[in-house]
Image: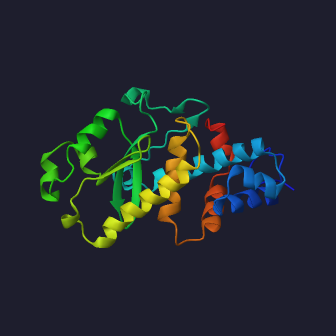
Amino acid sequence: MKNKMMKGAHLSERKCKEIIRLFCEDLTATQIADVSGVSRVTINNYLKLIRTHIAKYCEEYNPRYRMAGAFSFMPVHAGAGPTFAEEGLQEDVGWLYGIARHDKKLFCDLLSRQEYEELRKLEGTPDDQLHDLGNRRQNHYTATADISGWKLTKLVPPSLQSSLQDQDEYDLFWAMTKSRLSKFRGLNRSTAYLHVKECEFRFNNREDDLFKLLTFIIQRRPLHYSKANGAE
């Protein structure tokens, strides 16, 4: 039977759905390989394709790009990481992020070292003064994160955040992100972006049926789409 999820795949569509379901249960590649009977190499290839799809989905719903009328998704090429050389991110690519909150969800964007340091200067600045400090891109963020040093900085003082729940959401997201990423001993800089976007996806949809949502995403744009765009 034709596999609608992955053109030219050696695995059946049923087996692909099994891998996706196990991924949604947050099993490791080794655990998924043991349960599914598929080699770990193959599982790792599929997981990278799945994470690339998740990253694209997150970018498409990122308010920063939606409000600008354009989407911005940079596919990850094997061993190279996101192609942000023109933005001066060569040294820190994958490690530094700006975090924005919109409609009770958190969104993470890659930052250059310069952008990251400029944002750190805004720590504790009253919200009504932020428009006078820095550019529009910087003012979009309410927190920064450095995953190489596990450092989260909230830019808006707790007294000016709308509720205690808002403060807790950042801490909850950061705790989940640290817990998930720390299990990858020596996280690869070239794929760090995909893992951060996966954390964003899991956090923002933690009340939803992840398998149903991810299946919808992949049926809308099959896995070989990511393969053709450099996520091998």
Q: How many marks?
A: 0
**Residue shown at the point (24%, 70%) measured from the top left:** 162
Foreground residue among 51 and 37? 37
- Residue 114 visible in the shown view: yes
Q: Is residue 8 above or below residue 22?
A: above
The residue at 49%/31% (across/down) is: 83
Q: What residue lies at 49% left-to-right and 62% top-to-bottom? A: 203
Q: Position of residue 226 (x, y in %)?
A: 63, 43
Q: Nearer the viewer, residue 135 or 167?
A: 167
Question: Which quadrant holds the C terminus?
Answer: top right
Horizontally, residue 82 falls left or right of residue 158, namely right
Do we see residue 57 in this rendering? no
Please name the residue shown 33% across and 72% down the image: 165
Place of residue 7 in the rendered image (x, y in percent of width and height, measured from the top left): 76, 46
Residue 145, position in %: x, y?
37, 47
In the rendered view, would you say 104 is above or below 156?
below
Image quarter for residue 148? top left
**Residue 190 place in picture, x, y as percent:** 54, 35
Residue 20 lies left or right of residue 185; in this view the side is right
